[in-house]
Image (cartoon, rainbow, N blue to C red):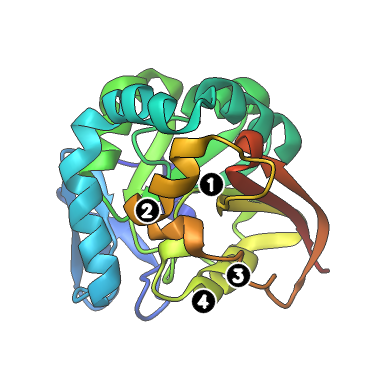
């Protein structure tokens, strides 16, 4: 079950009501219970997802155990990019404050978890939410000792009170969300005034010159054909960078007071 500090900021993603810890579930004031699976709280709303969200969720549930293999083999073959070095660059650019309370959205199998814990330090509090339960299971299996609380939730309906986090970090996913603008508005809502909001995803720039990757990747992942969603109102963009040798973008913003 989740630590007390995380439960204290949880809210029903449908009504905004507080949630309390029950027997293997989180319970709303009217008795509605949200189950836990393998110790992972499930707070997904709506229960019936938009078709594109449901389709991508099924895909990521299926590939969760093989994510590393696909990245090492296909990723290296089609991009020539050192993904581990790219992730370290992304976390360094993010500029997250050590000791702060941070929400990570869409961790996948936890590829950023060791870097985030190292950058933020042992005193920080970190929650990771993902729509894919199997990806969260992989987070727990691989990095259970890093004290990062996993929650199954929809990025378009975050199950947290307003202004719950000092910072928010997201890399990978927003391009393919059914409503990226809604997700970014949620990012702003749950971040405290003055807090840092960092998000990014795939984007193929002219800097990326791998001949096979330029032809194949847009067909394998439609995210490469997308442009970054407009920044949300309520946040001021501080900087934007190309990452992964031109295969991605990273935007840093600050929530307005």
Q: In the image, what residue occupies the spot 52% across and 65% down?
A: 226
Mark 1, residue position: 171
Q: Cα distance, mark 3 to mark 1? A: 13 Å
Mark on residue 221?
Answer: 2
Q: Viewer-nearest of labels 4 and 3?
A: 3
Out of 145 and 90, give the one closest to the viewer: 90
Mark earlier in primary sequence (2, 3): 2
Which quadrant of the rendered structure holds the N terminus? top left
Mark on residue 182?
Answer: 4
Q: Viewer-nearest of labels 4 and 1?
A: 1
User: Tags 3 and 1 in contact by the CB under 8 Å rule?
Assistant: no
12 w.r.t. 96: above or below: below
Q: Rate crowding at label 3 as few (under 14), some (14 to 19) or many (20 or more) other CA atoms within 10 Å.
A: few
- Let me know if residue 42 appears in the view: yes
Mark on residue 85?
Answer: none
Q: Cα distance, mark 4 to mark 3? A: 10 Å
Q: Rate crowding at label 4 as few (under 14), some (14 to 19) or many (20 or more) other CA atoms within 10 Å.
A: some
Mark on residue 229?
Answer: 3
């Amino acid at each position: 079950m989740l630590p007390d500090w995380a439960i204290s900021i949880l809210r029903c993603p449908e009504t905004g009501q507080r949630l309390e810890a029950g027997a293997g579930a989180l319970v709303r004031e009217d008795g509605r219970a949200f189950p836990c699976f393998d110790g992972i709280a499930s707070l997904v709303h709506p229960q019936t997802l938009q078709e594109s969200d449901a389709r991508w969720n099924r895909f990521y549930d299926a590939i969760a155990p093989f994510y590393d293999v696909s990245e090492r083999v296909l990723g290296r073959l089609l991009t020539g990019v050192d993904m581990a070095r790219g992730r370290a660059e992304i976390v360094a650019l993010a500029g997250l404050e050590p000791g702060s309370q941070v929400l990570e959205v869409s961790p996948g199998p936890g590829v950023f978890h060791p870097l985030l814990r190292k950058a933020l330090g042992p005193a920080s509090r970190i929650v990771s939410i993902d729509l894919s339960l199997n990806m969260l299971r992989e987070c727990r299996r691989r990095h259970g000792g890093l004290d990062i609380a996993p929650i199954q939730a929809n990025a378009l309906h975050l199950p947290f009170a307003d202004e719950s986090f000092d910072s928010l970090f997201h890399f990978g996913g927003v391009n393919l969300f059914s409503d990226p603008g809604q997700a970014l508005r949620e990012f702003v809502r749950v971040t405290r005034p003055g807090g840092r909001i960092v998000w990014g995803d795939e984007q193929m720039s002219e800097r990326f010159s791998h001949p096979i990757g330029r032809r194949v990747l847009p067909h394998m992942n439609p995210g490469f054909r997308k442009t970054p969603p407009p920044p949300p109102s309520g946040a001021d963009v501080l900087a934007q960078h190309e990452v992964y040798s031109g295969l991605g973008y990273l935007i840093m913003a600050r929530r307005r007071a």
